[in-house]
């Protein structure tokens, strides 16, 4: 699956007073038809995209589907396959932030309502980058609640992951063959010196926490104590162990130059740049969860020569091929996003209006060098990879096929599997 995405981050800053809406900053609301058309013209078949939650979820049981109706109708007409991103770093003002205990159930209802309105949609990322969302909002103090304590961090984690689990369950009641692609940041923390080994090991355990809870994998004893010491009850922890949704999931992982960190003895962190790279870190995550993998995000600044992003694309694609050749079932690759982004150079903490040249296209919708390179990469590889491994073709029902005999057969088979799972006792990894 060759993929790109529409950047739909929408956290709040300034203690909730300012909404940072990347769809607005990148002029998507005015140019969405043009954007979908260039995705199609690029030969990209899959698109990470979702309606802006803060404009769609107006209150408990209250929705404005007008924009979603228009955009998803066009996606279906163009026969693009959406990977629907329902929550991307922000919540509506009336929900406040991720400290709100009402968020999981309200998000569950929202996901169910979306699935019922668009039953032809099969692929979902319910909550994007759960680790980053909780870290930036409730540990670094940058977004949304802008908290910095361990307690606020654990609270955000348990609400975000519970929301993701409840949303998956809700969507499966409508679409039993739904596939969930967890777009999750793949991280590593390097100890700078021997005194930093302890802090680095703790951080390397926490990097897995959202996915451990999401997939019902028991955390290690140190992390379990950390959770209990910072507000998670035993009953809340057990919630994550009783759901068997892993078999519906692809482990989507994101990798940027900023995903590896140097840890000092006092626990402070600074950038490490690319040390291990996507191949090694993906192997670590795959060894832990044993799920099919999709590279769900990467990008790079175009750079002064105009070739830095092209070189990064080549390097990431080489890593994807190495992952695949080493026996990891990898099913897709994504350059994120379609267009340049705005103010990510300050991780959306400031509204400077500074354009970051990270997209396949600039904000005038003129193709960048990396866009030309990605289009060529797709042309070169799209017919090679399926013939080498037909087994790694994701069982996607194309939008235009929804409702036909094949689609209904696949849904019936998925329903049978789900019912057989319900009848079996849960087995948990130790």
Image: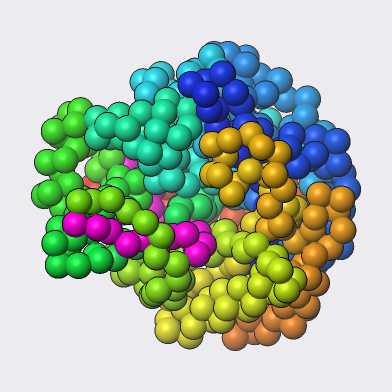
Residue at screen point 48% across, 21% down: 15
Q: Can residue 232 be seen in this view?
A: no
Residue 96 picture location, percent across and down: 48, 18
Q: Position of 131 compared to 86: left or right?
A: left
Q: Position of 324 compared to 233: left or right?
A: right
Q: Assign the C terminus to one quadrant of the image.
A: bottom left
Residue 414 picture location, percent across and down: 50, 51
Q: Quadrant of residue 406?
A: bottom right
Q: Nearer the viewer, residue 125 or 352?
A: 352
Residue at screen point 61% across, 26% down: 19
Magenta stretch containing residue 245, yes or no?
A: yes
Q: Position of 253 compared to 343: left or right?
A: left
Q: Position of 279 compared to 25: left or right?
A: left
Q: In this view, does 147 lie above or below 395?
A: above
Report the span colored magenta. Answer: 243-265
Q: In which quarter of the image is residue 238?
A: top left
């Amino acid at each position: 699956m060759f993929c790109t995405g529409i950047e739909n981050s929408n956290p709040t800053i300034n203690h909730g007073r300012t909404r940072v809406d990347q769809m607005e900053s990148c002029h998507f609301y005015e140019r969405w038809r043009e954007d979908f058309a260039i995705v199609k013209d690029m030969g990209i078949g899959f698109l990470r995209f979702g309606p802006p939650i803060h404009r769609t979820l107006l209150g408990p049981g209250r929705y404005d589907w007008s924009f979603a109706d228009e955009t998803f109708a066009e996606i279906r007409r163009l026969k693009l396959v959406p990977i629907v991103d329902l929550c991307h770093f922000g919540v509506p003002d009336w929900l406040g932030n991720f400290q709100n205990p009402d968020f999981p159930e309200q998000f569950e209802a929202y996901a169910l309502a979306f699935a019922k309105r668009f039953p032809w949609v099969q692929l979902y990322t319910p909550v994007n980058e759960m680790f980053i969302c909780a870290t930036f909002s409730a540990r670094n103090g940058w977004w949304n609640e802008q908290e910095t304590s361990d307690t606020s961090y654990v609270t955000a984690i348990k609400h975000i992951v519970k929301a993701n689990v409840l949303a998956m369950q809700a969507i499966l009641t409508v679409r039993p063959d739904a596939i969930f692609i967890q777009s999750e940041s793949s991280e590593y923390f390097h100890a700078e010196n021997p005194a930093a080994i302890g802090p680095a090991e703790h951080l390397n355990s926490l990097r897995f926490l959202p996915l451990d809870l999401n997939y019902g994998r028991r955390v290690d004893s140190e992390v379990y104590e950390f959770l209990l010491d910072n507000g998670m009850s035993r009953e809340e922890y057990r919630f994550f162990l009783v759901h068997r949704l892993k078999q519906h999931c692809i482990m989507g992982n994101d990798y940027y130059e900023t995903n590896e960190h140097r840890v000092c003895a006092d626990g402070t962190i600074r950038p490490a740049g690319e040390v291990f790279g996507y191949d090694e870190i993906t192997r670590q995550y795959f060894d832990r969860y044993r799920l099919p993998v999709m590279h769900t995000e990467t990008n790079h600044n175009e750079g002064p020569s105009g070739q830095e992003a092209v070189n990064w694309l080549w390097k990431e694609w080489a890593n994807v091929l190495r992952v695949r050749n080493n026996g990891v079932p990898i099913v897709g690759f994504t350059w994120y996003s379609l267009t340049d982004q705005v103010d990510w150079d300050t991780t959306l903490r400031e509204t400077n209006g500074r354009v970051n040249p990270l997209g396949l296209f600039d904000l005038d919708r003129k193709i960048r060098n990396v866009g030309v390179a990605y289009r060529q990469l797709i042309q070169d590889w799209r017919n090679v990879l399926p013939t080498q491994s037909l087994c790694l073709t994701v069982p996607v029902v194309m939008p235009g096929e929804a409702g036909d005999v094949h689609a209904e057969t696949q849904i019936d088979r998925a329903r049978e599997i789900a019912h057989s799972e319900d009848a079996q006792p849960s087995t948990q990894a130790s």
